Image (tube, rainbow, N blue to C red):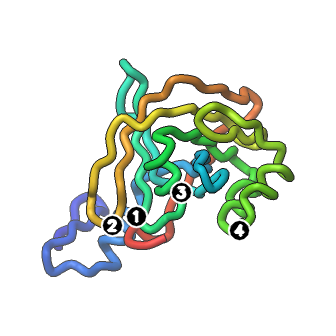
């Protein structure tokens, strides 16, 4: 390791703790991804989402392969990404714990869209169509075209910093 203006660099012998903490400096947001499937509505709390293109507007979303919403994405090929608002913990709490998505959607006043469901508590929502799915090991990376969206100008998006870069 070496020190450069207060920074430490890990070499191959560096600890996983150092690596985990270095990864936490990649700032993300927090969103609720919603989709429709033949078995009903699906939702997942996601923090791996990022805009990656402008023409066409394009985002990527990374989901652990075992997530139930993956089945809905494979079937429908589209989804709605609802960005959580700064200072509002309701969406994060509800979708981290919810087992009954239909009831949760009803209680939150979710609005059905072509691609999924928009949530009024969100700072914005984006309606997306999957353009490509890429296997990246333990996650699927969904590259999606954004074809519609709405923003709540009185809400700022949540900025999220992970506690660990190596697990949820």
Residue at 35% across / 50% down in the picture?
A: 141
Image quadrant holding the N terminus, namely bottom left
Residue at 72% across / 63% down in the picture?
A: 93
> How far is the residue under mark 2 from the one under mark 4?
23 Å
Q: Where is residue 152 in the image (x, y as percent from the top left)?
A: 72, 29
Mark 2 vs mark 4, foreground winner is 4
Mark 2 vs mark 1, foreground winner is 1
Question: Which circle marks residue 138 in the picture?
Answer: 2
In this view, the residue farthest toward the front is 38
Q: What element carries label 1?
A: loop
Labels 2 and 1: the sequence-earlier one: 1
Q: Is residue 5 left or right of residue 93?
A: left
Residue at 74% across / 64% down in the picture?
A: 100
Labels 3 and 2: the sequence-earlier one: 3
Q: Is mark 4 on a helix, strand or loop?
A: loop
Labels 4 and 1: the sequence-earlier one: 1
Q: In this view, does 25 lie to the left or right of 162?
A: left
Label 4, residues with CA under 10 Å away: few <14, some 14-19, many ≥20: few
Q: Name the residue under label 3.
A: 69
Question: Which circle marks residue 99 in the picture?
Answer: 4
């Amino acid at each position: 390791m070496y020190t450069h203006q207060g920074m430490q660099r890990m070499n191959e012998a560096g600890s996983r703790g150092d690596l985990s903490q270095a990864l936490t400096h990649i700032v993300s947001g927090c969103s609720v991804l919603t989709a429709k499937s033949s078995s009903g509505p699906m939702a997942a709390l996601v923090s791996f989402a990022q805009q990656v293109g402008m023409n066409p507007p394009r985002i990527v979303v990374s989901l652990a392969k075992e997530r139930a919403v993956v089945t809905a994405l494979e079937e429908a090929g589209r989804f709605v990404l609802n960005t959580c608002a700064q200072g509002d913990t309701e969406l994060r709490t509800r979708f981290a714990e919810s087992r009954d998505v239909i009831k949760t959607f009803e209680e939150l006043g979710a609005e059905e869209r072509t691609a999924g469901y928009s949530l009024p508590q969100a700072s914005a929502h984006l309606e997306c169509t999957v353009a490509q799915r890429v296997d990246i090991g333990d996650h699927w990376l969904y590259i999606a075209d954004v074809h519609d969206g709405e923003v709540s100008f009185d809400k700022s998006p949540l900025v999220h910093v992970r506690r660990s870069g190596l697990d949820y």
